[in-house]
Image (cartoon, helix red, strand yellow):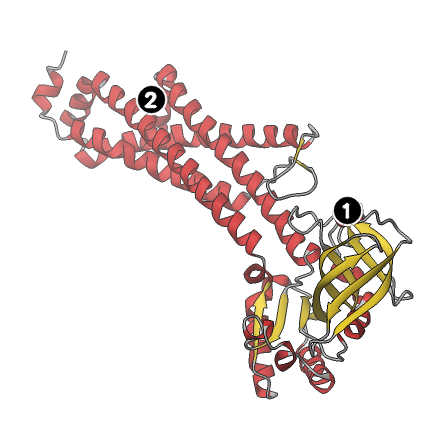
Amino acid sequence: MMNTFSLALRNVLRNRHRSLASILAIATGLAAINLFAGYIAHVYGGLQIQAVAGERLGHLTILKSGMLMEGKLHPKKYMFDQAEMARVRKVVEASGGVRLLSPRISVSGMASNGNASTIFIGEGIVAEDSRMLREGLYDDAGGKLDPAQKYGIAVSADLAKLLHYQVGSTVTLMTSTIDGQANAMDAQIIDVFNTGNANTNDKYLVMPFSFVQVLLDTERAERFVVLLADETQLEAKRKQLQSQLAAAGFDVEIKTWKELSSFYTQVRNLFDMIFAFIASIVFVIAAMSIANTISMTVIERTREIGTVRALGMRTFGVVRLFSFEAAWMAAFGIGIGLAVTVLLAWLVNRSGISYVPPNSSYAVELLVDLDWGRIGMVALVVMLLSLAAAILPSLKAARRNIVDALAFA
């Protein structure tokens, strides 16, 4: 085995020009796909932070069953009252592994500066929980609340421009209460922020939870947002809380941040499809390059193959020899591709290139992570395809009549 392995290496080096072409083709393709994998890995991480912290979805959201559909028409029926809120908090906090359990309530209506009005959508958040919910965001992102200011709200940047708001301005908010009565309240702007999403940056407000309760004339909460100590336990924790809350008499549904963030899901599905398409092209190029190199080598070494077959080497031995040669070329290509990946990722991350992604309201820096999971997977597939690509031409050569092979000119 070792003699065959070392002999295969010598054969690769002997045909260095043809081998180099295959190695460079593999290395170039791998570097390209690894860089794209690193880019989308960074995008996924950013989208997760935006969903969990920017959209304040937390890791899990607890709602009464039917709230997402029927609750739009009959919100009061599907909201948690004061007693239920206390019971839910007791069950969740007793389960362990929870960093934060925060009640939440949504509101929409009209915002006015006295001269003009426009629609708004907003979230009522416990001000004391706001800082923890914003972890991972830039300091000027997400909207800040001050526990000391019960009427202090944060306004999205484009909405502030639209109605000529600034920090310190007073805004009048008009909406319908839970029971369908008209209500209006004045609030003071304490922060202007960028939501990061072009669709919400001209209408989004972040308000104290108690302020929204008064605005809607209710003491209830619409849902609970949960931050976990270990986000890798997402599914296990969901099942645990679902079971424990059911045992406590609650008919609830628990959604993960991935299920509630449609933008994350859509972007991830798109990028995964693009990655699969690019990877398939790289795999085909690698396999065809190896197959072409082995085929040309087989033709040139037909007499050599006949000689070793005459000396007693079996068909499997010939196939193994050329498979090892393909493995050596794939290994060299993978190694060079990895080195190029690390170098180019380092250069890109220090280039300071920025761009405005689709549906975003601000520019982001172009960064590339090293996604070792995908890098390892791609390298393994390339190695296996290279071995497979070498089998057919080597098997064909090994089965050739020995006399004909020795007489080949």
In the picture, measured across the screen, residue 21 lies left or right of residue 209, that is: left
Q: Quadrant of residue 100?
A: bottom right
Of the 4 image quadrants, the one containing the N terminus is top left
Q: Name the residue that disc number 2 marks.
A: 11
Residue 290 is situated, as x and y percent measured from the top left of the image, at: 33, 27
The residue depicted at 35 percent of the width and 40 percent of the height is 384
Amino acid found under the numbered disc labelled 1: Leu
Please tell me which residue lies in front, 101 or 280: 101
Q: Quadrant of residue 77?
A: bottom right
> Are circles 1 and 2 on residues that touch, CB within 8 Å?
no
Q: How far, Cα to Cα, is label 1 from label 2? A: 72 Å
Say which of marks 1 and 2 sits in front: 1
Please, is residue 409 above or below residue 357 in the view?
above
How many numbered marks appear? 2
Secondary structure of residue under mark 2? helix
Please tell me which residue lies in front, 373 or 304: 373
Decide: few, some or many residues near mark 2? Use Cα within 10 Å; few <14, some 14-19, many ≥20. some
Going from N to C along the chain, the mark reached first, 1 or 2, is 2
Q: Quadrant of residue 404?
A: top left
Q: Is residue 5 visible?
A: no
In the picture, measured across the screen, residue 84 lies left or right of residue 339, that is: right
Residue 4 is situated, as x and y percent measured from the top left of the image, at: 31, 31
The residue depicted at 52 percent of the width and 40 percent of the height is 37
The residue depicted at 13 percent of the width and 25 percent of the height is 310
Q: Name the residue that disc number 1 marks.
A: 162
Q: Is residue 398 visible?
A: yes
Amino acid found under the numbered disc labelled 2: Asn
Residue 232 is situated, as x and y percent measured from the top left of the image, at: 60, 62
Residue 406 is situated, as x and y percent measured from the top left of the image, at: 12, 17
Please, is residue 295 above or below residue 364 in the view?
above
Of the 4 image quadrants, the one containing the C terminus is top left
Please, is residue 305 above or below residue 228 in the view?
above
